[in-house]
Amino acid sequence: MQDVIRLLPDSVANQIAAGEVVQRPASVVKELMENAVDAGATKVQIVVVEGGRTLIQVIDNGSGMSETDARLAFERHATSKIKKADDLFALSTMGFRGEALASIVAVAQVELVTRRAEDELGTKISMAGSVLEVQEPVMSAIGSNFKVKNLFYNIPARRKFLKSTQTEFNNIVTEFERVALANCNVEFSLKHNGNEVVSLPISSFRQRIVNLFGKRINSLLVEVGVESSLINIKGFVGSPESARKKGVQQYMFVNGRYMRHPYFAKAVAEAYNMIIPAGEQVPFFLCFDVDPSRIDVNIHPTKTEIKFEDEQSLWKIIAAAVREALGRFNASPGFDFDAADIPEIPVLDFSDTDRNKIAAPKISYNPDYNPFKKKTQPYDHSGRQWEKLYETGKNGFYDEMESSVLEAGPVVESRPIFAEEYIPVAQYKGQYILVPVKSGLMWVHQHRAHVRVLFEKYMKQLCDEHCDVQQLLFPERIDVAANEQVIIDGISKEISDLGFEISSLGGGSYAITGVPMGIDGLDPSKLLMNLVHSVAEQTLSVKEKLHEQLALSMAEKVAIVSGQLLSNEEQERLLEHLFATGSPARTPDGKTIIYTMSDNDIDRNFNK
């Protein structure tokens, strides 16, 4: 019988390792940025083409490499960070396993130009699929210049599973933000398809947050600072006013390394218990300084999950630190008496001889008023006779009125499910509409019903590429983060088809000049940002799916809320629109709209 175990060729082993390290273009950006920071760079430039498919270039002014080191850097497990196993528990740098470059060069065409300060000439190395093609001396600036071209060119199956250009670049921006936040002493810039998306000068941690996520976040940050024997914590958490259901920025760093830690995130959330509405979240940017021997950063291929000793003790310290910060903030900021724009309050001078001219206020009343005296005709507070209005309503006043919130275009013939004669539609707790039908009693969830109606309306508008726009008298300005800017630019046409008119002001700022008709009472900027966050969470690439998510998100925000009282006419009109849709029983995301209690079920309960 032949032996069946054999050693894998280096090219195959490198591709297997690449499957863990290089999952998408964003993985390459992360690894190269971290290498640049480890090399002592003070300036790092990232250039991306086609969401990283065609080109990822990272240029730094770090220490550079010698000719020998430049070649060895592409070998598996070649690293300058570890000499013995114990070094794994005293790490202070990002890359340490020596797998990143070997994994990248296994699935892409890579060119490196690098030079140290003490060398007159630099070194150029070109590799593809782990095979060396060129190694030669060249003139170059101090530092390293990596070009990663045609990612997954030799693995078509992997390349096929890459998402859209917008989605992949959005992932790159996410990794860029994580590294940039952890290294405020480094200047970063990011370009995509020739356009500069982000430019970050060296700054404080707070200013780095503002530069990345917009000026609006500055007033919502509450500083956190605690020192203990187990952990030192510094950074910022959001004030209660910053809470929202989606799209919040939440970042944790340990010893300068980004990490995901749901357990510690719950500690932050615990501090906001009974302060913010249930289901909402706040942004936080927290940096932990921990003895490297008390953490294990080698438990996950991407090194974003870290194991701590004494996690329960750390949980209590984190929660207490955030509570203490919120206590100092006091949830309602005190009056700033040093502010320059405080209005001057006049002071009454009681030494004035005219002070006796100030008269005390007098109370006037009508002594003949009798609240129990019956009027001949009922009036409302404005003196108008409302009984005539009621009579007008009974004679067809409401037939001519169309509620803007329920307006959804022409109604086709409704399905014949209603009983021929039934009592007027009733509303239960402002949440359900009760309708007698041939088989029993039908309960309709009014908010979900309106979501279905509006979803159909917005989907039609997106397909027709037309929507009625209401111009704003005063444009609204919004400041967005870099990743949000990428999404807005990527779905600008779809946003326009929904009825929003926006224009870029540069630097991540936009002006909203027009909004869809029929959203009176809603905040246009919040509605637009909810659309952006919905798309960001779904990472959609298919146009049809994108349209569905936009239409659903818009419908959920515009639809009447549970608890809103509706007149009989409004209830009936909502039902007419609902049953004119193709799927009245469920919302687009599968939630139940209609529940029918049969006559048999009702009779059975009364026969007991």
Image (cartoon, grey):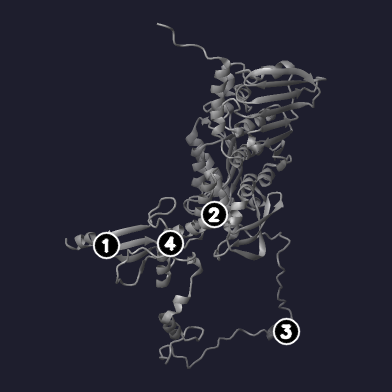
Q: How much space separates mark 1 and mark 2, taking CA atoms?
A: 37 Å
Say which label, 3 or 1, has the lower sequence index: 3
Q: Please give the residue where the numbered disc 1 appears in the rendered image.
A: 439
Say which label, 4 or 1, has the lower sequence index: 1
Neighbour tally class for label 4: few under 14, some 14-19, many 20 plus, Cα within 10 Å: some
Q: Position of residue 349 (x, y in %)?
A: 72, 76
Three-letter code, disc 1: Ser
Three-letter code, disc 3: Asp
Q: How much space separates mark 3 and mark 1, taking CA atoms?
A: 83 Å
Q: Please give the residue where the numbered disc 2 appears in the rendered image.
A: 463
Q: Please give the residue where the numbered disc 4 appears in the rendered image.
A: 562
Check contact, mark 1 vs mark 2: CB within 8 A: no
Q: How much space separates mark 2 and mark 4, taking CA atoms?
A: 29 Å
Observer-nearest of 238 and 495 = 495
Q: Please give the residue where the numbered disc 3 appears in the rendered image.
A: 354
- In this image, 105 relative to 420: left or right? right
Q: Secondary structure at mark 3?
A: helix
Q: Secondary structure at mark 4?
A: loop
Q: Position of residue 393 (x, y in %)?
A: 43, 80
- What is the quadrant of residue 358 in the picture? bottom right
State the residue at coordinates (60%, 84%).
361
State the residue at coordinates (67%, 17%).
132
